[in-house]
Structures are given as structure tokens and as C-alpha cells.
Amino acid sequence: MTNQNEKREDENFLVTPWEVKGIVDYDRLIKEFGTEKITEEILDLIKDHTGDLHPLLIRKIFFSHRDLKWLFEEYDKGNKFFLYTGRGPSGDTHLGHLMPWIFTKWLQDKFDCELWFQMTDDEKFYFKEELSLEDTHRFAYENALDVIALGFDPKKTFIFSDIDISGHLYPLAAQVAKHITFSTVKATFGLQNESNLGEIFFTSMQAVPAFLPSVLRKRNIPCLIPHAIDQDPHFRVARDVIPKLGYYKPAAIHCIFLPGLKEGGKMSASIKESAIFTTDSAAEVKKKIASAFTGGQGTAEEQRRLGANPDVCSVYKYYFCLFMWDSKELDNLRKECIGGDILCGECKKILLKKIIPFLEDHQRKREQAKKQLDKFFITHEQLSSGEFEK
Amino acid sequence: MTNQNEKREDENFLVTPWEVKGIVDYDRLIKEFGTEKITEEILDLIKDHTGDLHPLLIRKIFFSHRDLKWLFEEYDKGNKFFLYTGRGPSGDTHLGHLMPWIFTKWLQDKFDCELWFQMTDDEKFYFKEELSLEDTHRFAYENALDVIALGFDPKKTFIFSDIDISGHLYPLAAQVAKHITFSTVKATFGLQNESNLGEIFFTSMQAVPAFLPSVLRKRNIPCLIPHAIDQDPHFRVARDVIPKLGYYKPAAIHCIFLPGLKEGGKMSASIKESAIFTTDSAAEVKKKIASAFTGGQGTAEEQRRLGANPDVCSVYKYYFCLFMWDSKELDNLRKECIGGDILCGECKKILLKKIIPFLEDHQRKREQAKKQLDKFFITHEQLSSGEFEK
């Protein structure tokens, strides 16, 4: 395993689960992380099972995977998979977080499968100097409202905080931890001698949900993890260890990061202006979109004459990743942009007409979700009760 | 903090919680570990509170401490302490393990205080390549029989396995872990880049029982940890961190290691012949004592003429540490030994007359303890129930 961290810092390009900096070269990530590109063959394989393809697949926002062929082979033999994804609860949810969850919801609908959703409140406590465990635990429940608001099946969706069910996770994380050395986490995550013991141990906790349902059901169940590519180092390590415990290597499907409203990087909750939060008011969204970075020209006259560049434009990326699933509509907008037929101000107004109703609807569902937390969160007692053994 | 490990290996003298090698120089340990010698003044202080002194104190087997003066100051103000000790359950219990527990029982009797007894089944799993978590968990319950057999107060003694109550320990260990770096565990325990993540994280788990009762009772309660000096590195680190979480630094009282039947080192369960196990039959004990290392001469004639050396004799150490509390009786035996008035074979017979009835009695109580495990072991559910909040 190479030291990703050192290598990339040299070139202003850094991807670890905790930091994404610079312009991201996704083909390079596939090569360096050792994942596989989602080819036309893989898209056909998915379509054979789902009937259609989600725009996030067609647009290659989900662009990389591990072991999807194997997953479908098992599926075709009747060995159905469960989904596992998660969230590091260090702040409010923004639109960038929703993208993979929307895709995960699509997978749950298509395959009628369980979703195990991990809130890594321990992780964010370890990695964020300023956050207490109470803070991250509170964010876990806040963020869950956004997950629930997306419409996951309450009968098949199990959300949990690491801290809440650590009595079940820690004994399994211990089994993982025994197989991982400090050298490995140093090379994989760029951890240092100055890293704290929680940061060092944590990857063991993130590995557990990939086989927890197999432990509870006392049979080996395939796992598919939809996640943003920056989390791959965790699962690369997990995939080495989990078979040693007698369980399947988890398969994965990876998306790009939803870029922020400024240039480069992923949308980050820690740079408030760069992200649209699910709880933002219409006025806040308007203000943020108004100052969003675009590929436009200095003046309206220049833009009419020279056209603009959608490929560097954060507004275009919102359409592309979340708010314009119709390919024809998106193509037309792109052509208008390049041809100088639309100005950035006009384009931003169209986006606002999509974002604001979406957020209003989401905020309504988010409010309703407050009464549903109990239905979705699993507890230590539930896991001990044997109800999952069926 | 110096790297104890590197420094000592140079000189064939090594003390970490996992390894004790060579001839141990206890004065040097006090200096290097930064603990305090138990002086006559400290003995008087203890006696003022207990009325008498346990032979293990008089004989300086408990020879070192941290913060005993403070502990008694708090005690005199009405701020009573609890006791915390533990066991790494990696095998059967031997007599060396009983020594500090016998002293701990004396402390419980004298101060009528609680004892929290940690079975570090996670630790032994991490550090022993060949042991599974099932193995160490089983040993936790096996070893507890020996603790219970010593007669601890079932109303005031709480034994727990780390794995059993990890749902309560892990969230608190997380708070500790955030304050300890890899550099610290490297320097303190001699851990390396090749150490596994569990080994690295573990000291955080061992710190928790020193403030767990304070967390449960929602008030700060002083803690006294009676333990063998080799565990001091854990508590040295814990004492740095625990005040940052708002709790008292635990006080400690340290004993030497009970030496094995061969030369040097501490009695070790991993060298079967060097230890007398609590479940050994009379025949096994006889065989082990027969081949025990002594300070005797090559022939009976030489011994009559030159006398023997009790200070290197493992048989004498059994008398000294466990089986001859009467000082006059011990003095007489010592004089006979030095004067050549007793041969090693005779002396071993006297020891057997003490060990075998002790073990028979212990084994009877150990058998009875099997029905009492539930009374002593605390569960996740009990800790969650709020019954400790009183």
C-alpha cells in the first residue's frame, strides 16, 4: 500500500476520508485506489436487474466499483445483498450528502433490500478537536432526519449511532482491529505518531456494519456499500480483513464528490458558504446561489458573444448531479450556456426554482421524520433481543 | 516520557504490562516510573486508618504508591474511595495472581468499600496471537471464580468483562483515547508500527474503571488501584488524561511480582512449570515444588556446613509472600536456612503442608463460586438500568 497522503500533497491533490483538496482526477483515483471503472458492460448488468438506470449512473457520477459482478452472480443464485452506507455526523446535512443517499434509496427500491446506515459519531469526535461526543451524537440524530426524509423503507432501514450500539460494535471491531497494524493506517490514511488512539482505532468500527447483519443472522450475506470515493481507504482495509473473519468481502459502488459552490474540492459543511444545507431558508439559498462560482464571462456582452463554460460551473453541477434528471433538458441548457444564449443570472434563477421547492418539500418531510426516529434507529437492546436472528 | 522498553532491553531488564524479564530492581522501577516509595510515614498513615498492617505491607511486597496521602486526606474529609483492580484473562489463575487480590480483599474489609474488578478479555485477545475472543472471555469467567473464592463482599464487588459491558466502556474509552497519541503509547508501552490497532487502543479501556463509578454516580469519587507494578504504565497515562475529563487522578498502591519457581521474572501462566495454578492437584503441586529452584547447596553435607541462601530461593518467597504471615515463624525459618539447620527437602515439605490445604480450601470455595457468578458479574443492562446512580 502506498502512502497516498504524502504522494498527493506534493501535487496539491489530496484524498483521504477526512480531506479532499484540489482538482480531483477520478481516473487517477480508480488507478491509485485499485477500484474498477463502471463500464458499459457493468451498466448493462445493473439494467438487467433494475429495468432502467438512474441518471447518477448514466452520468457516471457513480463511476467506480468493487466486485459488482460477483455481487450480481450471488444475487442471481438467490443470495441477496444488503446495503450499507453512513454519515460522519460533524455538522448539518448539505445537498452533497443527499446525492449518494438518493442513489441508495433507488437501490433499496429496486432490490427491495435492507439498508444499514452507520452514524459515526465516534469518528467525528476523534477527528474534530472542537466537537464533544455529545455534539456528534446530537448531529447523528439531526442528520438522520435528512436520511429518513428521503423516504427509505422504515421496515428495512436500520440507522444506528456507533456510540449507541458500541456494545455490539466494539467486540466485532476488536476482531477487525487485531488484523490491522499502525503501519497500515499510517500508509492508508496518512495517520501520524501524533494521531490520537481513537483516530487510529476508528477504521475497525467502520468495517463492522459490512458484516454485522451476517453476524446477527448467523449466515453470510453479501454487502453493497454505495459511498463517495473518499471513503474507499476504509473499505480497502476492511476488504482485506473481513474474509479472515469468515465473511464476504463487501462490494462497493463509488460516486464523485458533489463539488462546492466555490471552485474545486467537495462541498464541505466546514466551509459554510460553499454548501447549501437542507435546513437553509429560501433567502439563504438565494444568497448562496447568487454568489456561486460559474463558468460565465466578465460581462453580459462577452457572454453573449463568447459563451460560458459549464464544465467549471458549480451551478451546472447542481443540475447535473441533483436537479435535472432529464437528459434532453440538461443537453439543451448546456448548449444554451456554451452558445451564450443564457446568462448566469438567468440560469441561477432556473436552478432556484428547482432547489427551493425541493428544499421546502424536504424540510416538511424532515419535520415529520422527527416522529419516526424510533422506527429507524436501532438500539443495543434490540440487537441483544435476538429479533435480528430471523 | 522515556522509552522504557528500548532502554531496558539493552540491559536484560524489561518491564512493560506484557513482559517482565530479568532480575527486577524495584528501587530503580520507583525512580523510572516516577512513583513513591511506601515509607514508614505512609505505613503509619495506613495503620491510623486500619488499626493494623497487612504483612504484605510490613514486608514491603506492596512497596510503592501514587497519591496515598491525598487519598487519605479525602477519606478523612468523608470522601470515601472505591477500589479498582483487574486481571488479563489469558489462562488459568496461579498463586502469583492471588497475592494482590488477597491484599485488595484486606483493603475492602478495612475500608468497607466497593471493588470494581476488570477482566480485560479484549486486551488478552489483542496481545495473544493464539487466543480468540471466545477464549479470553471464557477465561474471564474462569478467573473470576478465583476472585470470588477469596471472599469478596458480593454486595460491594462488581466484576465485569470488557467485552460484556463495552457498550458502557467504549464511549468513555473514546473520551480517553482522544487525549492519547501513538507517540505516547510507543514510548510508554514499547508499541511499534507493527502493533495492531487493538493493542494501540487498549490502554483507553483500562483507564475507564478508574472513573466509571464517578460517571455512574454522577459525582467525583476517589479511586485506589492496588496492582502489580508492571501495570503502572497504563495508569501513568490514565492519570494524565482522567483529570482532563473532570475526574480525580486515581491513586495506586503497587506490589512486586510474585517470582516463579524458576529463577527471576514473575510467575507466568505461559510457562506452565513455573507456576502453581489454583486448580492444580496435590500431586501436581508436589511435583512442581519438588523441582522448584532454591538457594540450597549441592549436597546435604555442604548445606549443613555452609547454610543456604533464602534470598534467591523461590520456596522462601512463597513463605514470604503468601504462606507465612507470622514474622517470628518466618524469621526462625530464615535463620535455620542460613545456618544450615534445615535442608531444602524438609523446607519444601513444610511449604507443601501449607499450600495443599490452602488449595483444597480454595478449590472448594471456587466450586461454590460457580453458583455466585451472577451475583458478582455486572451486565450492560444493569449499568443501563440506573441502579448505580444511587
Image (tube, coloured by chain):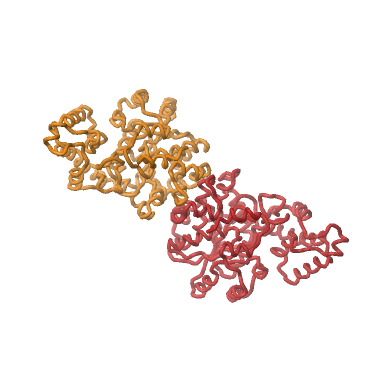
Chain colours: A orange, B red
Residue furthest to the right in view is B301
Asked whether residue B375 appears in the rendered view, the answer is no
| Quadrant position of the C terminus of chain A in the picture | top left
Seen at 45% across and 66% down, the residue is: B220
Pick the residue in front: B211 or B305: B305
Q: Give the image location of residue B367, x and y in percent.
A: 65, 54
Q: Quadrant of residue A208?
A: top left
Q: Give the image location of residue A78, x and y in percent.
A: 43, 27
Q: Give the image location of residue A95, x and y in percent.
A: 27, 42
Asked whether residue B223 appears in the rendered view, the answer is yes
Is A276 left, or right, of B309 in this rendering? left
Seen at 66% across and 51% down, the residue is: B269
- Can you say whether B376 is above or below B329 in the image? above
- Can you say whether B364 is above or below B334 in the image? above
Pick the residue in front: A386 or B36: B36
Q: Give the image location of residue A83, x and y in percent.
A: 39, 36
Q: Quadrant of residue B231?
A: bottom right
Pick the residue in front: B237 or B345: B237
Is A293 left, or right, of A77 in this rendering? left
- Can you say whether B287 is above or below A336 in the image? below
